[in-house]
Image: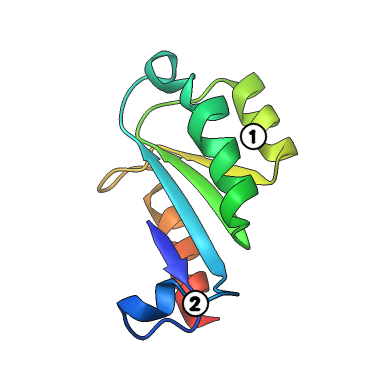
Amino acid sequence: LVVLEDIKNCDDICREGVRARLMVELKDRDYEEWKGDVDSQIIPYREIFRPERMVVASVRPVPEGARARLRSKGIEVVEGVYPGGPGENALLDAVKGALLK
């Protein structure tokens, strides 16, 4: 999920200077199954797209060491993201904040 700034149509996405307000990487498996994505996808996405805010939204718990590493790169981790889950509102707040900016 990406919330882009000043985008009205598909042609605008290719325009130079487009900024991502929010980028959300969704994970629905145990951390052990996607931990390789941290170095191959998540951190590179942050460096390439430079979103104002980046969130890893995980259905399942993420080990503290992994959360700390992602935080050090400017990436938030929200756990328990599923309908009615403890992280649902935190993710919704991030999306609303990006849309209302």
Q: Nearer the viewer, residue 90 or 70?
A: 70
> Real-space Cα distance between discs 1 and 2?
29 Å
Q: Tag 1, which secondary structure?
A: helix
Query: Residue 12 appears in which quarter of the rendering?
Result: bottom left
The image shows residue 1 at horizontal and vertical percentages of: 37, 56
27, above or below 3, in the image: above
Residue closest to the far right: 72
Closest to the observer: 55 or 89?
Answer: 55
Residue 60 sits above or below residue 75 on the image: above
Is 30 on the left-hand or right-hand side of 93? Answer: left
Q: Position of residue 10 (x, y in %)?
A: 31, 76
Is tag 1's residue or tag 2's residue first in the polypeptide sequence?
2
Q: How many marks?
A: 2
Q: Is residue 33 left or right of residue 49?
A: left
Which label was assigned to residue 15? 2
Residue at 44% x, 67% y is: 3
